[in-house]
Amino acid sequence: MQLQKNISLKKFNSFGIDCIARDFVIFKSNNELIEIAESFQNSILDSHFILGGGSNILFTSKKIDCIVLKNELCGIQLLRENEEAFFVAVAAGENWHQFVLTCIENGWAGVENLSLIPGNVGASPIQNIGAYGVEIKDVIESVEAYHIADKCFQTFSAAELDFDYRDSIFKSRWKNQFIISKVIFRLNKVPNFKISYGSIDAELEKMGIQTLSIRAISDAVIRIRSSKLPNPALIGNAGSFFKNPSILKQDFDQLKIQFPEIIGYTNKNGSIKIAAGWLIEKAGWKGFREGDAGCHANQALVLVNYGNATGSEIFTLSEKIIESIHKEFGILLEREVNIY
Ligand SMILES: Cc1cc2nc3c(=O)[nH]c(=O)nc-3n(C[C@H](O)[C@H](O)[C@H](O)COP(=O)(O)OP(=O)(O)OC[C@H]3O[C@@H](n4cnc5c(N)ncnc54)[C@H](O)[C@@H]3O)c2cc1C
């Protein structure tokens, strides 16, 4: 464990925002994590920041005045299996997409639709990552996390984590209390193919796939995502900046009169989920650019840093978009990206 001072986080966040960490330390084992927590005691309790792959954060100031703990815990281990599933423990610092590829290699089914999502395994439960009709909660058996104040590791079943759309207890009641160290996945032996969401089925057809497999689905998702989403290595971004809002059915019916082309998906509780990207595009923000902060020209839901935007410029743009959507549609957008 080596404490570094005044480290630039520019290369550690997919927005490419230049923000200086007052203190920066990498941990590669549970023992190192315990050592850090003990040596920094109260200062960690007061203020710390856990950094994974940095693909879902926006730093809005020039300096982050706390200890940044960079998680580099590694290891993937098949724990056991039963008739239906493999139980696999994955250390929090493993790259998410590399883990998905390991699953494809081993015939562990359930995460193929989540191919190519950036970031680390440890952050995947935080916002219950999801894409193409699958959410991580569907394959999480349990999560191991270090409680910073109590200085102990605890294990939680998926049922205890209040998973919801891009949400979990780690974003609400337990915010900043835990460092996720390991996720145990329950992966199916017999795949339950989900291809009707997005354009997976059309892509499989284009690829000439005759026999469906988790590898084929993963390849299709990779092709779709690569063609649609801006690559953070080329243009700084954090994927979808806002969550898709849900509104009451009667409010949706009203909007439908005004905007007949609006599409909504009925949630289990009867409310209607609307594509935030559609609202932003309809309000005229798609392709908008102010300095180096912008709203992507092909994906209105993705805010981008064209080079030298500051985090606060991107944040200000997000404020303007929220205000404009509220004014035009009466809907309050919520940010998906974590703001610091
Ligand atoms: C191009 C692009 C596409 C994307 N597509 C999707 C998508 O399809 N679906 C989706 O759900 N998301 C998507 N995302 C968002 C992002 O990839 C995910 O949210 C991912 O899980 C973030 O992982 P990370 O390791 O980069 O987390 P970070 O950005 O490093 O951290 C995110 C939050 O989690 C906290 N955190 C991180 N690790 C830990 C830990 N071990 N313990 C406690 N707290 C922790 C951080 O403090 C921070 O609050 C996309 C992002 C990009 C750039």
Image: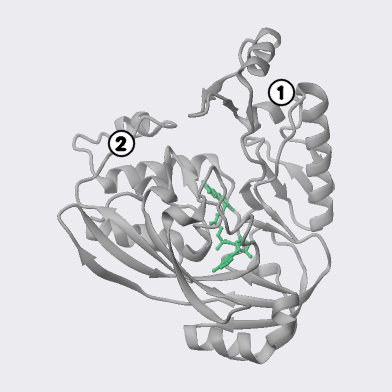
The picture quadrant where one finds residue 97 is bottom left
Query: Considering the numbered disc 2 on the image, is that residue within a helix, a strand or a loop?
Result: loop
Residue visible at 49% across and 52% down in the picture: 117
Q: Is residue 29 visible?
A: no
In the picture provided, is 37 more to the left or to the right than 160? right
In the rendered view, tell whether residue 34 sits above or below residue 110: below
Whether residue 303 is visible: yes
Q: Nearer the viewer, mark 1 or mark 2?
A: 1
Determine whether, in the image, residue 157 is placed left or right of residue 274: left
Residue 282 disc label = 1
Q: Is mark 1 within 8 Å of ligand 1?
A: no
Q: Position of residue 195 (x, y in %)?
A: 34, 34
Q: Position of residue 265 (x, y in %)?
A: 52, 24
Position of 131 relative to 154 (above/below): above
Q: Quadrant of the C terminus?
A: bottom right
Figure disc tally:
2
> Which residue is at the front of the view, 325 or 312?
325
Q: Quadrant of the N terminus?
A: bottom right
Q: Amino acid at mark 2?
A: Met
Disc 1 versus disc 2: distance between alpha carbons? 32 Å
Quadrant of the image occupied by residue 261: top right
Disc 2 target residue: 207
Quadrant of picture, ligand 1: bottom right
Comparing 112 with 17, the one in front is: 112
Q: Amino acid at mark 1?
A: Lys
Residue 207 on image: x %, y %: 30, 36
User: Is residue 263 placed above or below 138 in the rendered structure?
Assistant: above
118 lies above or below 326? below
Q: Residue furthest left?
A: 83
